[in-house]
Image: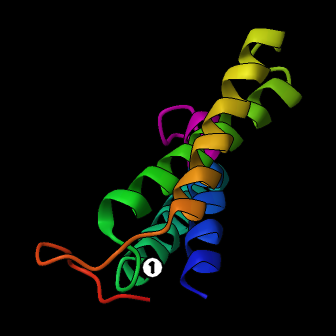
């Protein structure tokens, strides 16, 4: 369940980042409200996920998935130019995130999260 919360939070990170871009410096009300709400909910989800997922792993997944989705959305909507190189690099980010999940984590003396 913590991994699903983390992934949902990462999706919301892409939402708030995209809304921030659409807000024109927080001068447009609707994207500004979406930015604020999605940002807050995304942070709460990240905070919940790090109760069991180590912060380094959780933050890498949160930012990696959020960044990949933000760039993908920008390319899909015409905000950024799509290219084969970009798609390959985004695939690398997603692959690294999957790798972090597959490798898992072991509880160590310096770890903030309990095993599980």
Q: Position of residue 19 (x, y in %)?
A: 63, 46
What's drawn in magenta, residue-wise? 17-29
Q: Position of residue 69 (x, y in %)?
A: 70, 43
Q: Secondary structure at mark 1?
A: helix
The residue located at (51%, 68%) in the rendering is 42
Relative to 14, does residue 1 appear above or below in the rendering? below
Tell me the quarter of the picture where residue 68 sits. top right
Closer to us: 105 or 92: 105
The residue located at (65%, 78%) in the rendering is 4
Closer to us: 72 or 107: 107
Tag count in the figure? 1
Q: Is 19 inside the magenta-drawn segment?
A: yes
Left or right? Give the position of 55 relative to 5. Answer: left
Tell me the quarter of the picture where residue 74 sits. top right
Relative to 13, does residue 113 appear above or below in the rendering? below
The residue located at (45%, 79%) in the rendering is 49
Q: Quadrant of the N terminus?
A: bottom right
Q: Position of residue 20 (x, y in %)?
A: 55, 42
Q: Is 87 inside the magenta-drawn segment?
A: no
Closer to us: 95 or 10: 95
Closer to us: 82 or 28: 82
Tell me, yes or no, if residue 40 can be seen here: yes
Relative to 55, does residue 21 appear above or below in the rendering? above
Q: Quadrant of the C terminus?
A: bottom left
State the residue lying farthest toward the left.
109
The residue located at (52%, 40%) in the rendering is 27
In this figure, which colouring scheme has been used for the structure? rainbow
Relative to 84, does residue 33 appear above or below in the rendering? below
Q: Which residue is mark 1?
A: 49
Tell me, yes or no, if residue 83 can be seen here: no
């Amino acid at each position: 369940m913590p991994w699903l919360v983390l992934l949902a939070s990462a999706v919301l990170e892409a939402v708030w980042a995209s809304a921030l871009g659409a807000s024109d410096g927080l001068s447009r009300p609707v994207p500004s409200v979406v930015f604020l709400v999605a940002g807050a909910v995304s942070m709460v989800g990240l905070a919940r996920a790090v109760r069991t997922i180590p912060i380094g792993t959780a933050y890498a997944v949160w930012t990696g998935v959020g960044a990949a989705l933000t760039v993908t959305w920008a390319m899909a909507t015409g905000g950024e130019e799509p290219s084969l190189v970009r798609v390959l690099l985004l695939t690398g980010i997603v692959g690294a995130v999957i790798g972090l999940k597959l490798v898992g984590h072991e509880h160590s003396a310096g770890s903030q999260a309990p095993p599980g």
